[in-house]
Amino acid sequence: MTEIIETAPALPKTKSFVREVVETLILTAIIFMSVNFITGRFKIYGASMDATFQNGQYIIVNRLSYQFSKVERGDVIVLVPPGTAPSNFFERLIGLPGETDFIKRIVGIPGDTIRVEGNTLMVNGKAVQEPYIREPMRSFAPQTWNLKDDEYFVLGDNRNFSKDSRDPSIGPIKFDRIVGSVWIVYCIHDN
């Protein structure tokens, strides 16, 4: 028995080349948008996270990190501060970060009681050892926050030069303000 195999007629070389270019461009666009949906690239501005991160460094943020795991104390995140509109879906897809995104460390999760007294951070009545902070924080009057469901307390590692949850204009943040967790530093210096 003889098997007959039909083959598609050969495309002229020009059509074949154009088709390959179009397929490559479409695949590149799909990969680009997928990477930007899953990750975000940000540049550190300011000294609020010294000595953990320095001004001018670039970081990659995992946007999906909290879709599969819980936010934990000690996580370093990028967040959209209250009063600032978050990037919309299209802006995230093409990789446009917000102009005022903050980088901070989670020190309190829902249900925690946070107290700053003197230069000590206390979570649920216990002093927290923080080897990552640049210097002891200055504090004027003792402050206490009782975190509600879906509230997180964030501080910069350089506490004396950080606008964070201690500031009434920021306060505890909601989960929907978290862009993602810091994953990688990919450029040490900006020249």
Image (tube, grey):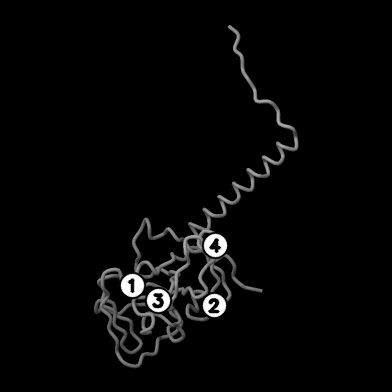
Q: Residues within 10 Å of mark 2 (few under 14, many from 20)?
A: some
Q: Which mark is residue 45?
A: 2
> Which amino acid does the dot numbered 1 rest on?
Tyr
Q: Earlier in the sequence, mark 3 or mark 4?
A: 3
> Which amino acid does the dot numbered 2 rest on?
Tyr
CB within 8 Å, label 3 to label 4:
no
Marks 4, 1: nearer the viewer: 4
The residue at which mark 3 appears reads as 82
Q: Which residue does the image show at 61% across and 17% down from the upper left? A: 5
Against 174, residue 64 (above or below) is: above
3D distance between C-alphas at marks 4 and 1: 26 Å
3D distance between C-alphas at marks 3 and 1: 13 Å
Q: Nearer the viewer, residue 18 or 149?
A: 18
Residue 81 located left or right of residue 47: left
Residue 151 located left or right of residue 75: left
Quarter of the image with the C terminus is bottom right
Tell me the quarter of the picture where residue 77 sits.
Answer: bottom left
Q: Position of residue 22 (x, y in %)?
A: 65, 44
> Which amino acid does the dot numbered 4 rest on?
Gly
Q: Earlier in the sequence, mark 3 or mark 2?
A: 2
Q: Which type of secondary structure does the marked residue at label 4 adopt?
A: loop
Marks 3, 1: nearer the viewer: 3
Q: Earlier in the sequence, mark 3 or mark 1?
A: 3
Q: Residues within 10 Å of mark 3 (few under 14, many from 20)?
A: some
Q: Residues within 10 Å of mark 4 (few under 14, many from 20)?
A: some
Q: Position of residue 114 (x, y in %)?
A: 29, 79
Q: Which type of secondary structure does the marked residue at label 3 adopt?
A: loop
The residue at which mark 4 appears reads as 95
Q: Position of residue 141 (x, y in %)?
A: 31, 92
Q: Earlier in the sequence, mark 4 or mark 1?
A: 4
> Which amino acid does the dot numbered 3 rest on?
Pro
3D distance between C-alphas at marks 1 and 2: 22 Å
